[in-house]
Image (spheres, rainbow, N blue to C red):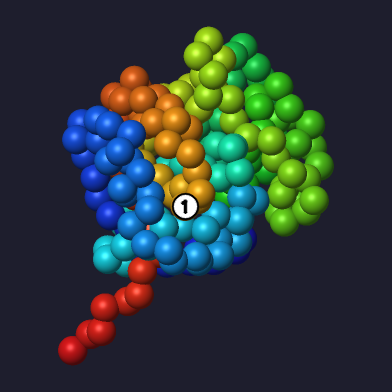
């Protein structure tokens, strides 16, 4: 399994993010262009923030870029999250499929394609980079269902609420960011850590 990189983040309250103008302000904090070695190759906006690993800013991270939305879940809750999704969509996953899903850093395919993707999954393969994204459409809101399933898994396994982070490409249009944040609020996620690119502060 690949070692996770360390990323900075800025904690924000979604209740305060009530206008597209403020969302844009968060996204375009600077002209920094850092490479993110994941399917979307996200170039994060810059800021002055705090450095931490995934355990510091959440058990789940939403990635937004190239007009697509993907998810990254903490390894501890991946299996139960997929089981919960299967219950929601009346799908059964084999032990082998569950085991493969536990090794996946990024979920970025529609649920209808997930079984075939799991059957041939290989990290950093062409298919890995060609994932078409998770549906966020009204009436087909798979992103919301993934979030709810992960919340249930976190509650069942760790008896705590799930913490979410958002990493978006600096060129992402505000309507897409707004839709993602609306989904978070719909699923009763009222705070999110915005992952950005910044220089480490000098330590004394």
Residue at (69%, 35%) from the top-left corner? 132
Looking at the image, is 134 positioned above or below residue 199? Answer: above
Q: Is residue 79 above or below residue 146?
A: below
Residue 183 seen in render: yes
Q: Could you tell whether 15 is left or right of 92 in the image?
A: left
Residue position marked by numbered label 1 in the rendering:
170
Q: Residue at x 60, y 56 (%)?
A: 41
Look at the image and tell me whether residue 158 can be seen: no
Q: Residues within 10 Å of mark 1 (few under 14, many from 20)?
A: many
- Where is residue 58? Give x, y as percent: 35, 48
> Image check: 46 left or right of 173?
left
Rendered location of residue 12, percent (x, y): 24, 45
The secondary element bearing badge 1 is classed as loop
Residue 37, quarter of picture: bottom right
Residue at the image point whose x is 30% and y is 38% from the top = 21
Of residues 27 and 79, the one nearer the viewer is 27
Vertical side of 184 occupied by 104: above or below: below
């Amino acid at each position: 399994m690949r070692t996770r990189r360390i990323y900075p983040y800025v904690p924000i309250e979604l209740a305060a993010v009530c206008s597209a103008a403020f969302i844009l302000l968060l996204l375009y904090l600077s002209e920094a262009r850092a490479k993110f070695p994941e399917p979307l190759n996200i170039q994060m906006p810059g800021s002055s923030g705090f450095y931490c690993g995934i355990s510091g800013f959440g058990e789940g991270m939403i990635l937004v870029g190239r007009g697509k939305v993907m998810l990254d879940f903490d390894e501890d809750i991946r299996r139960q999250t997929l089981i919960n999704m299967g219950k929601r969509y009346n799908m059964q996953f084999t032990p082998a499929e569950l085991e493969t899903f536990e090794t996946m850093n990024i979920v970025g395919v529609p649920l209808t394609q997930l079984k075939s993707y799991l059957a041939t999954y290989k990290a950093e393969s062409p298919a890995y980079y060609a994932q078409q994204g998770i549906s966020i459409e009204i009436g087909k809101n798979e992103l919301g269902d993934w979030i709810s399933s992960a919340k249930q898994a976190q509650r069942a396994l760790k008896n705590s609420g799930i913490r979410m982070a958002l990493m978006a490409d600096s060129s992402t249009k505000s309507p897409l960011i707004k839709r993602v944040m609306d989904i978070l609020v719909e699923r009763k996620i009222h705070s999110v850590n915005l992952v950005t690119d910044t220089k480490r502060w000098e330590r004394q």
